Image: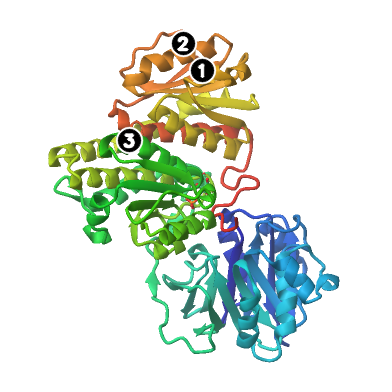
Amino acid sequence: MCGIIGYTGPLEAQKILLEGLAGLEYRGYDSAGIALCMEDSHIYLAKKAGKVKNLKEYCEQQVTISSHSGIGHTRWATHGGVSDMNAHPHRAGKVTLIHNGIIENYHALTEQFHVQDKLVSQTDSEVAAHILDQLYENDPLVAIRKLASLLEGSYGFCIMFEDQPGAIYAIRNVSPLVAAATHSGSLIASDLTALIPYTREYFVVPEQRIVKLTPYKVHVYNLDDTFSKNYPEIMTVNWNMDAAMKNGFPHFMLKEIHEQPEAMQNTILPRVNKGVPDFSDDGIPDEIFENCNQVQIIACGTAMHAGMVARAILQPVLRIPISVSVASEFRYEEPLIDKNTLAIIISQSGETIDTLAALRLAHQCGSTTLAVVNVKGSTIARESDYVFYTHAGPEIAVASTKAYSVQLAALYMIGCRMALVRGKYTKQDACGFLAQLLDAIPAMETIIGRKEQIKKAAAHIIQSPDAFFIGRGLDYAFSLEGALKLKEISYIHSEAYAAGELKHGTIALISDHVPVIAIATQQHVYAKTISNIREVKARGAFIILLVKENAVVDSELADIQLRIPNVGDPFTVFPIAVALQLIAYYASLAKNLNVDQPRNLAKSVTVE
Ligand code: AGP
């Protein structure tokens, strides 16, 4: 997703902007650009398709620019292809701006303001620049307010006006922005990674408020022409720059796979009280668990897969309907939720626009909302009734790993607490469940220790254009995430399939050497799963089998066996997840692909 950074202060702006954009690369992008306010207040523009290093090399070839304020942007294309011209910033008359989001009514506005003939790019952002320039007379706040009243859709804008040297204006609707006034100057960015080198104190730019950055102060204005009296809450960053760096690992993804045991401990242990889950410090009351008659889980991608696992574990215990919906679908499926529904919203970034829209719909339906979020102060966290923050630290790799594990830990703890307060679990049951959850952590360490064996297994996959993940029950729920991991970073078409369903059509795709990653850790369906594995083996599949250490397996069944420590069946997802993440990681590595920033993908999808 697009990255934004703005700076004004005593230091050289170009260096700060380029370094900030490098820190935002993990978000996923395809072009980058900066705009600098020159000493004569002229605005210098440099923008290039490709990586930030392309832009940096271009800037180094130009005459050295001395500037103390500017804006920078990494673009993830929504309107218009990847090109220098479509890269941000966009200039129109006195206005230069960068934009994250989608202006949904830009076609109508293009006609209304007759800007078609002025456009040099195919972007909605440039349309906004031209309109703002038309609205601008001599007061940026008035012009920005007028622009905001016209726009439909999501936006995070940073704006410079040629006759306002040293000032940077910003406004947001959905697309996140954070800002800080520091001793080094004032900064604004799409996320904390770009601010951390300069400050640990920041605030989240509130929706529909205009901020004006001057060298040592950030001013906040309301849209209704009044000066904002209630300054946003100043927050403190809860992780350090090292956490956002690779620390000696070749890739963020491998680092974050290794961080999972610690992330699990940091998420679970602070919420254990006398052996059972306790959310008092989170401000999550038992009433929301006692009073609901159904649970609706809403998320996207990996977060949705965590929801699928949680549903499979918790519905048999709680004996109430637990539904899992893809957020982008949920919004349009006339959901049967109401005030008696507990809506659990899962999001690592807390900014996924589909999930945010689903959260807002859940509120409109009168449901109580509980967010499971990793980024403190994110939009979904702030808009939910209650928040269970996971403590995974920053997840930089686009492919989600530690966030998935801690989302599961959170959901398991929530389910355990819910079972306890609803009388489905005795205190002893809850203690036992939580103890088994904690036992899963060393099992993850064990699998991390077997990564060389897993690397060998991955080598057998990369030759095939397709791969299948199969399992029954919980193993099928686990396989969904395994398939997503493999496809998103190795570009191998991967499908997760209920093992018992293959023979109803898809088995036609199994032929010699097609890799099938089979998961068989659930005792009550083990024999049936083994039968399904034999069916694909008989048709030439290359079998990579994930089973528990104490499982009895015919030696000729699988081409490769990956053994999983003997944790309880409901908890095998944690070591299994690590194994499937490592399979995907090594497959991507073997194909010399960009593991941390796969093509077309963004870390936080803030456009619909
Ligand atoms: C998974 O590896 C991807 N990063 C993606 O599916 C992600 O899980 C999804 O976009 C949801 O993001 P969120 O958790 O930040 O809402």
Counting from the top left corner in percent of width and height, residue 528 is at: 40, 15
Question: Assess mark 2: CB under 8 A from ligand 1?
Answer: no
Task: Label 2: state its secondary structure.
Answer: loop
Counting from the top left corner in percent of width and height, residue 223 is at: 54, 83
Classify 10 Å Cα crowding around label 1: few (below 14), some (14-19), many (20 and above): many
Classify 10 Å Cα crowding around label 3: few (below 14), some (14-19), many (20 and above): some
Task: Label 1: state its secondary structure.
Answer: strand
Nearest the viewer among 381 and 335 is: 335
The amino acid marked with disc number 3 is Ile
The residue where tag 1 is placed is 543
Q: Quadrant of the C terminus?
A: bottom right
Q: Earlier in the sequence, mark 1 or mark 2?
A: 1
Counting from the top left corner in percent of width and height, residue 74 is at: 64, 61
Report the Cα–Cα distance between label 3 and label 2. Answer: 28 Å
The amino acid marked with disc number 2 is Leu
The residue where tag 3 is placed is 313
Nearest the viewer among 107 and 478 is: 107
**Label 2 near label 1: C-beta < 8 Å?**
yes
Counting from the top left corner in percent of width and height, residue 83 is at: 77, 58
Task: Label 3: state its secondary structure.
Answer: helix
Nearest the viewer among 553 and 462 is: 553
Q: Is residue 573 left or right of residue 102?
A: left
Classify 10 Å Cα crowding around label 2: few (below 14), some (14-19), many (20 and above): some
> Which label sits on residue 557?
2
Residue extending farthest to the right is: 117
User: Which residue sits at x=65%, y=84%?
Assistant: 143
The amino acid marked with disc number 1 is Ile
